[in-house]
Amino acid sequence: MSDPVSRLAEALTGIAGAPVELERPGDAEHGDYATNVALRLAPTRRRPPLDLAAEIAGDAVQRGLVTAAEPAGPGFVNLRVSDAWLADAVSEIVSAGTSFGARSTTSPERIQVEMVSANPTGPLTVASARNAAYGDAVARLLAFAGHLVEREYYYNDVGAQMERFQASVEAVRRSEAPPEDGYQGEYIAELAQLSGDPVPAMLERIEATLERFRIHFDTWERQTAVEAEIPEAIALLDTFEEEGALWARTSAHGDDKDRVLVRSDGAAGYFAADAAYMRRKYARGFDRLIYVLGADHHGYVGRLQALAEMLGHPRDSLEVLIYQLVNLIEEGEAKKMSKRRGDVVFLDDLLDTIGVDAARWFLVARGHDQTIDFDVDLAKQRTQKNPVYYVQYAHARIAGILRNAEAQPGGTRAGPLAIEERELVKRLLEFPAVAMESAERRAPHAIPNYAIRVADDFHRFYHHHRVLGTDSEGFRLALCAAAQGVVSRCLDLIGVDAPERM
RNA sequence: GCGCCCGUAGCUCAGGGGACAGAGCGGCGGACUUCUAAUCCGCGGGUCGCAGGUUCGAAUCCUGCCGGGCGCACCA
């Protein structure tokens, strides 16, 4: 896939003889684009950077790639593109439509993203919501980049936690107090109204919440189904017996220590289920497995990678994406959330309060390596200040213009492009690189960040220039259409609506 | 003790080798006969935790230290 900027970079690469990356200088004096290729090349070419820069600049202008190019600073090449180049770029964005910036990968893979996977012992909390918002945004980015992505939810349908949960519901049904270490909360009482196993009902509720959060899971995997295949998995592993237990020699594959597969009491350990589950995933034909886990699970990375290797798969075909936790702030103090204690914020409550758009934006807009302090009381206020509305507003404004337009986008412009027009076009042209890097780094927060910049440039353009009824109407309509496409794509990549009206 | 993450403006955070470090919020002051003022414009605000190192160049990479968060089960 190509776009105007990467084609320019490729052409310059041909001139320089080394990969050229174009950046947008912070200072307008430095032109539209700049490259540091001369600085990088200087040591190996044994020439002063500025000489090289001058040479590259000269060639670039001579070959008509840019209208101006000059060496600058310690050895940058500053480039200026023509209005015509930018206008052509706008048409290209418009005609590319929804595929602008898409399919950036050169090697499409079949990828499974396993995320959320919260035990069905209660409604989803804001902690799981971050997992969901982050994991789904990564999944969307990967799909946009050209991969085949499936989302999976894994849950325990047996085990101590589940028994406690079921016993808690049973207790309420018998009008008794919940067991010690049991679960409390209104939802337990609600489940007690129904008959039978509360687990399927809880799962239905979780799925409904996730769908409301605009996340659709392709598959749901149960622990019992996975556990049935433990023997097949163990057969593939390097194991040894010690003190009556069966161990996997994960330490030979980079893990800190070996892991128990079968306990001395004969019961299968959790790691055995991990192994069986992973074997099953690979057997289903995925090229890449992505696990989305909270920071409290970062200790799993080593053992999961070891497992992948022991099962005969490349270590890097398995990725564990770790995001930092969401802290609840109450009266200025961080509290660890506990579902059993009941001091949690449920995702549904958050959505009732601030809505899906603000919630998804809020949870994905900061880096996943950054801990989020979630202040319940501030959530509602914060929503009014949420930049998501700033971005959505840009989209709605454009929709309004296009609604009122009688002419079709495209066509000529009158006179030279205004500074606001040039800035907006260049901003839109950044999108393919932003989307690609965001996908490759599994860093979806770059998208909302970029979307703010686009909205910024659009609002500025809007304020300074009228679209309809001007001599440049055709071009400006195309520019609006291009901006609308990029904004709506950005919002879609993080699961936020792009409203036609606000 | 060991491992992972974080420390950038009053607050919340971007920036992950390049040219004077950015945004939002908050503060102050301006702009609506207009395609949506949920907008725009201006002002103020920073020893990029500390100390070394690598480099032509470090907020960015390396080492150590300080501070904060999260983990280190034959639990699930």
Image: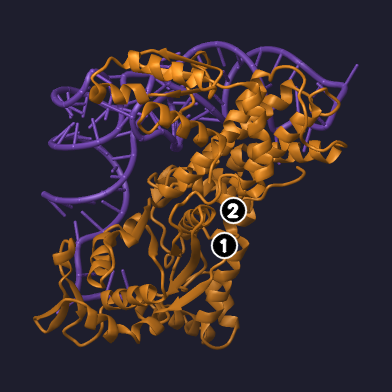
Chain colours: A orange, B purple
Q: Please give the name of the residue rendered at 77% of the width and 44% of the height, measured from the top-left corner.
A: A501
Residue A422 vertical position relative to residue A227 in the rendered view, above or below: above
Q: Please give the name of the residue rendered at 11% of the width and 84% of the height, measured from the top-left corner.
A: A244
Q: Secondary structure at mark 1?
A: loop
Name the side, left or right, on which A229 lies relative to B55: right
Residue placed farthest to the front in the image?
A63
Residue placed farthest to the left in the image?
A243
Residue A271 vertical position relative to residue A216 in the rendered view, above or below: below
Q: Quadrant of residue A181?
A: bottom left
Q: Are marks 2 and 1 in contact (CB under 8 Å)?
A: yes
Q: Camera-side residue: A423 or B73?
A: A423
Q: Please give the name of the residue rendered at 49% of the width and 75% of the height, measured from the top-left corner.
A: A220
Q: Please give the name of the residue rendered at 44% of the width and 68% of the height, measured from the top-left corner.
A: A117
Can residue A483 be seen from the camera position used here?
no
Q: Camera-side residue: A37 or A179?
A: A37
Label 1: which residue? Answer: A215
Q: Quadrant of residue A113?
A: bottom left
